[in-house]
Image (spheres, rainbow, N blue to C red):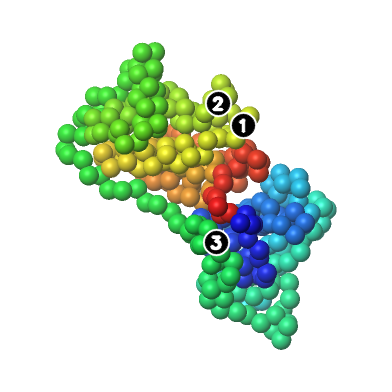
């Protein structure tokens, strides 16, 4: 069977974007590189509210140049901002981006505007030539059907499950917080490794032990690093997604699932480490918007939680994980399987 999905029109491309991002963008610019007649990397950034056009455009292009095979680009503006007053919202930003893309050797091939009610070509404003179309044309496109048939789904943000433990859970977790001795570190890492290899081995007792271990900053950091097999020794490199080899993304998915299970046994006020872990893994996958939500939840759970503040700053600055910028290492949602 052919491993590639053939897109024949704009509706197919617009259907592809929510599948590859995991959500339908809102108030966003989404740029897609092209490698000949194939789609390459996808980048979503917040719409440029009050941002200087050239600086905004240069930031986007600096990320897109990670795709060294790019020969062109596409752009989709998702917004309801001022669309009633103008057919081309953010026109100065788009023109600046068009210039920067041309300079970078990946000229803009086409662009579309998508609102909550319709979509149309952004570059052509002649309604006789390029009329506005219903969003149904995207959801009923052949591209969307093919992606769903291959097993893809626009899953959206997964909210943490409510606490389902008993009143003694808080004290049990606090009692399992290690003192930081080497033997504590090794025991916590061993338990964590066992659960990642066999998530079904997670019991309430084990959940309290792991939740307690995650309360200790140093042990938490080691446990996060242990998710990535063959990770470099430098903690900063691990946190920024600087990996020599492609991560075992199935193991990453398992770690996220385990973290969600841990939160079922963990009351509010002790969930911040797990929320940071999930947000960090989302960021490694290139899903910054999801990551930001988890970091926000972590800060709501524990005010001034330092790790959440640091990660949130990375996302707010528009920084991408190193591995997400390398097609050979980036997360594969297996749209072609």
Image coordinates for residue 321, horizontal then vertical, percent: 59, 40
Q: Gap in Å between the C-alphas at discs 1 and 3? A: 28 Å
Question: Please, which residue is most extreme toward the front here?
Answer: 1
Label located before the other in sequence (2 or 3): 3
Looking at this view, is 258 or 82 the one in front? 258
Of tags 2 and 3, the one toward the viewer is: 3
Residue identifier under label 1: 245
State the image coordinates of residue 76 (x, y, percent, origin top left): 64, 64
> Which circle marks residue 147 in the picture?
3
* Left or right of 334, for residue 297: left
Question: Could you say which quadrant of the image residue 256 lies in?
Answer: top left
Nearer the camera: disc 1 or disc 3:
3
Which picture quadrant has residue 266?
top left
Q: CA distance from mark 2 to mark 3?
A: 32 Å
| Image quadrant where one finds the N terminus | bottom right
For the point 58% across and 60% down, the residue is 17
């Amino acid at each position: 069977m052919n491993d590639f999905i053939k897109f024949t029109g704009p509706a197919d491309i617009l259907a592809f974007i929510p599948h590859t991002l995991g959500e339908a963008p809102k108030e966003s610019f989404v740029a897609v590189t092209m490698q000949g007649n194939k789609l390459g990397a996808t980048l979503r950034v917040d719409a440029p509210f009050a941002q200087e056009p050239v600086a905004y455009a240069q930031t986007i292009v600096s990320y897109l140049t990670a795709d060294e095979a790019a020969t062109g680009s596409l752009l989709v503006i998702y917004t309801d901002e001022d669309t009633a007053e103008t057919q081309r919202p953010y026109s100065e930003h788009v023109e600046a981006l068009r210039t920067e893309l041309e300079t970078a050797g990946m000229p803009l091939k086409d662009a579309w505007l998508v609102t909550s009610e319709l979509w149309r070509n952004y570059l052509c404003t002649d309604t006789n030539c390029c009329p506005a179309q219903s969003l149904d044309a995207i959801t009923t496109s052949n591209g969307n059907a093919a992606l769903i048939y291959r097993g893809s789904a626009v899953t959206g943000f997964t909210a943490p499950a409510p606490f389902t433990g008993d009143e003694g859970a808080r004290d049990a977790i606090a009692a399992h917080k290690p003192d930081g001795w080497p033997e504590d570190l090794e025991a916590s890492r061993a338990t964590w490794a066992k659960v990642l290899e066999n998530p079904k081995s997670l019991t309430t007792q084990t959940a309290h032990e792991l939740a307690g271990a995650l309360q200790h900053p140093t042990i938490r950091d080691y446990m996060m690093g242990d998710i990535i097999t063959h990770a470099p020794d430098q903690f900063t490199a691990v946190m920024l997604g600087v990996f020599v080899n492609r991560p075992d993304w199935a193991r990453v998915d398992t770690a996220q699932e385990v973290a969600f299970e841990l939160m079922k046994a963990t009351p509010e006020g002790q969930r911040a480490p797990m929320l940071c872990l999930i947000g960090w893994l989302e960021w490694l996958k290139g899903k910054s918007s999801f990551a930001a939500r988890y970091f926000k939840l972590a800060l709501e759970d524990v005010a001034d939680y330092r790790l959440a503040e640091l990660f949130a700053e990375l996302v707010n600055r528009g920084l991408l994980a190193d591995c997400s910028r390398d097609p050979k290492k980036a997360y594969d949602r297996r749209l072609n399987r």
